[in-house]
Structure formats: C-alpha cells, structure tokens
Amino acid sequence: MVRNNENRLNDLFNQAKSEPVQLSFKETKKQFVHSVNSSGTAGGKLAYSINLKLIGMITILSALAITAVIYSNSTVEKQEENNPKKALISLTKNDSIKAIEETDKIIKEYYSEIIEESKLDDTTKVELTVVERELIQLPVIEFVEEVKKRSEKTQRFFEEPYRFPKLTEAEIKANNKQKAKMTKRLVKFNDKFYSYIPSRTYKNVSIQAFYMQKTEVTNLEYRTFLFDLIIQNKKDDFLTAQPDQTMWTKEYPSAFNEPMKENYFSHPAYNNYPVVAISKEGVELYCKWLTLETVKAYPKKASNLNDVRLPHDWEWKLAASGGKSSNNYGWNSNSTMNSSGCYLANYNPINESANSDGGYYTVQVNSYNPNSFGLYCMSGNVAELVIEEFKNGKYIYRTRGGSWNSSAEELEINGPDKWKGRTEPSVNIGFRVVMSLRKR
C-alpha cells in the first residue's frame, strides 16, 4: 500500500509538471515575492492615506459581511432567549464581527499603500514588481477585485494536496532573486535582520555567542522556501512543510475565523506577519534549506558558517532578556505597559478588548520596540518554538514568549507553556532562527 501511494504521488507530480500552467507564477508573484523592502524596521504599521473610493467599496463589503453574520446569529439568539448560554452566544457574535473588521482593516491598508505608491511622480523610487505595476493601472475597484481573485487562486493552491504548478524560467529567476536576498542577509549577518548575542553566563549557564534573526520568520520568507522546494522537485518536503491554515477554524471553532483561514497565508497584505500553523518537521526543513542554499550561494564563506537552527531554550531566554537576568519580559520592565499606559506586546489583556494592545490576532513582526539586543516581539505575537533537549536521537521542543492569545503570565521569559507537547500545528506558534558563531 505504501509503495502504491508513493507511485501515485510520483504520477501526480510528473503529470502536474507536464501540464499547462494552471496557477501562473506571474499571476501570484504578487503574493509570493512581494519586495521585502516594503518592511520597515520600526513600528510595523502601514500608511493610512486611503483612497475614498476604496474606503467606500470595502466599507460596503464589510457591512454586507457583518450583516450576514448578524442575520445568521439572530435566529440562534431568538431560540436561546431563555438559555443561560445566551451571553456566550452574544460574545461569539461580537467576536465574529471584530474578526471580519480586523481582516478588512489590514487588507485595506495594503491596498491603500500600493495605490498611493502608484500616484508618485517618480515610481522608480518604489520597488514594484511587474505584476504590481500592471495592477495599479486599473481603476480602484477593478484593482481590488483582481488582487482578491489572485489571492483566492493562491489559497486554493495550498488547500489542494498534490497540486504542483509548472514554473517558467522567468518565474524561477524571480523566486531565486528573493531567495538570494535571504541568503545574502544571512551570510553577511546583516544587522538590519540579525542580532549578535555575545557569549555570557546567564543564570549560572554558560552560553556561546550566536546570531539570532531579529524577527519571527514571515509568511513571505516561508513562501519563498516552499516555492524553491517546487523548483527543486522536492515534492515530499513541500507536502511536509505546507502550513495548515484550516487551524484558524479548528483551534477556534466558536469564532468566525474564515477570513484568516482564507487570507492569512495567501494575501500579500500579510507578507510581513509571522508564519503560523506549520509543523515541527516543516520548521526543520526550512532551517536545513536556508543553510544549504546559503552555503551553495557563498561556498568560500562556508567555513565561517554553522547550521541554521532553532534556538536552544537557554539561548532564547538570554536573547529575550537582553542580557539582564532580572527581566521578567523581553524589555527593561516587569510590566506589560509603559509609563504612558501603552502596551509593550501583542497578547490577550484581561478585562480589555482583544485589540487594545494593537492587534486582534498577530501583528507585523517588527511591531513594538525591540529589546536591548534589537530583537522584536520576543514576548507575545506568536509563541516561538525552541529546543528544550535532545533525547533518544530526537529534539524535544517547547515554546517560549507566549502568543497573541496568551495571558501576561505566559509572556514572561520563564512563563508557563500551554503548547508544550503539542503535536499539531497551531496558529499561536511560529519561530525564528539562530546560527552559532564560528568565526567573527
């Protein structure tokens, strides 16, 4: 049976490669290879200069969607008037509306930024792809609808197993360009993207110097990895590494998370958000891939490089603390708010609305202020996978730092880990990579 399944997989893969292009890379390059230069180094917020026609159109769409949710729930409310769970049903309806509004807001900001870029007198100052330049020539409503249509095609691609697009030489070249950016940053330990964590003793544990990515791995970075697996015909690795976006609805079945399921990994508005719902095997493959591609691109510098990997538990705690063992969180304070009453991380504050800290779900990976090592979101946003120990020939994992849906206690550097031992992917869990220092 295993042999028959493998033969079937090979047949499907070869058939897909020989068929005409069903999902053009050119069509979806907007989603997969959107320029990393659009990501800043502080704040992580997009511009709010929004086209009035665009606001009107999206407001109407949002109103229709929200009306549909309210209408569908109204029948339930009438039936449950005398039910003690009525308050819970009402809360679910309210959360559903907020979920729709949050997704619409993020996508609206993305559309607005691209449209505003198109109005510049000198567009050479903005790095736009060929697809972007084509799209911004359309009227606003057509532009929005076209991007939505392409995003839906991308989403269907990740929902259908064994579907492998055929890429042209030009499309392969475009993805290789994006991959080259990632390997160049790593080999140079570019300080815009990687922080140097010096050797020191942290809470009586001696830790060797290493480099750590300043942010969690993004959707854009992970999608570049997936496309490269397709280019290299690594079909098994591709199927293993695909994120499971259905976890948005499986983990939170009582909330209306369909917009996140449909948009989070496929829509370019979420390029700079942390990748989630990936398997531990997918994370391991990403680390192995980034190591090998960097060595291939820079063979003369290979002797200075160790393997890209997940941080060990003590490495993560040292990095999160900023080197100060007295810190409970990833900043120089033992409170989740500063003196002005502003939240310092993305989590789930008690007795506050879900987005009072700046995000209803995840936020962009370079949001909030970095810690003293220049690292972003070491507490909150997504719980980060770390290596706890190596046992019986296998790594044992846990998470640190808490997620967008964690309590303040779970955000602490030594806080409880409610995902420890979890085997399924989770929309609360992401990762960032490190590399041990061999030669500086």
Image (cartoon, rainbow, N blue to C red):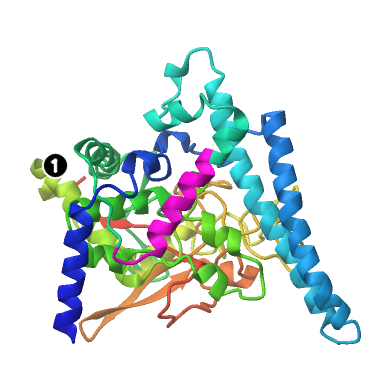
x 24%, y 51%: residue: 228
Label 1 sits on residue: 298
**In the drawing, does residue 77 fall left or right of residue 414?**
right
* Foreground pick, 274 / 378: 274
Quarter placement of the N terminus: bottom left
Extreme residue toward the top, this view: 121
Percent position (x, y) of residue 193?
38, 43
Say above or below: 46 vs 231: above
* Extreme residue in the front direction: 20
Q: Residue at x 59, y 58 (%)?
A: 259
Q: Quadrant of residue 440?
A: top left
In the rendered structure, the answer to whether residue 262 lies left or right of residue 243 reads right
What secondary structure characterizes most of the magenta part?
helix
- Please state the horizontal and vertical placement of residue 124, each as a whole percent of the image: 42, 17
Pick the front one: 227 or 402 = 227
Q: Which residues are magenta?
A: 146-162
